[in-house]
Amino acid sequence: MSPWRGGRLPHLSFVPRKPEPLGVELKTLCDSTTGVMLFLEICEGKERMPLKKFEDTYTHTVATTLRLTEPYANTGRAVYGDSWFASVRNTVALKKEFGLYFVGDVKTAHQMFPRKALARTPADKGAWLKYTAKHKGVDIFALGHRKGKSRVGMLVASCGTTTEGERLAYAYTEDSTGGLRLGGDRANMYTVG
């Protein structure tokens, strides 16, 4: 959301959940390595958005994702999306339309997603559950990982593996306040996982 500071805008949006709720709502595609914004789409309101490409075939979220990623069609790249973009529908559409893989945090788009099953992820912090399925010919991975006593993070993906990897060991040093920092001369080894 780009905040409104007065003046004329082609479309002004009000999104109460945003820190600056009044302004121009933007959807962007960025490179994860460099942080460079590759594409930007301005949300133009209820009258104009339905006229855009893919809106007649897909939901608004999926159509927006397809427009942003279309230049990368058939490159086999992976797209990571936040919870606005993360759904089984979006994951399937990216793979079928453009041959792109998807990974995203699922928070509200639960249709066709095993949310209730993943909520039963064991109570130990770091524990995880995995489910796999094929939907419309696309392999889908649903993952739940325990973030705390009452919180389970959920991911939907069309790439990756659900094979348990090696446990990682990191070297940490305790500082004067009792906190841990990475590395150091007298580092202790902690196993993660």
Image: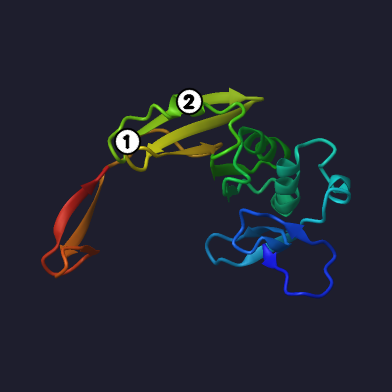
Q: How many C-alpha atoms fall within 10 Å of the one at disc 1: few (<14), some, or many (≥20)?
A: some
Check disc 2 and give the amino acid type: Lys
Question: Disc 1 versus disc 2: distance between alpha carbons?
Answer: 16 Å
Residue 22 sits above or below residue 7 on the image? above
Q: Position of residue 187 (x, y in %)?
A: 14, 62
Q: Position of residue 147 (x, y in %)?
A: 36, 43
| 47 left or right of 40 in image | right
Observer-nearest of 56 and 147: 147
Looking at the image, residue 86 sits to the left or right of residue 170; the answer is right
Q: Earlier in the sequence, mark 1 or mark 2?
A: 2
Q: Residue at x 51, y 26 (%)?
A: 114
Secondary structure of the residue carrying numbered label 2: helix
Q: Which residue is mark 1?
A: 127
Residue 55: give x, y in percent of width and height.
82, 42
Dot 1: element: loop
Give the quarter of the figure containing the N terminus: bottom right
Residue at which label 2 appears: 116
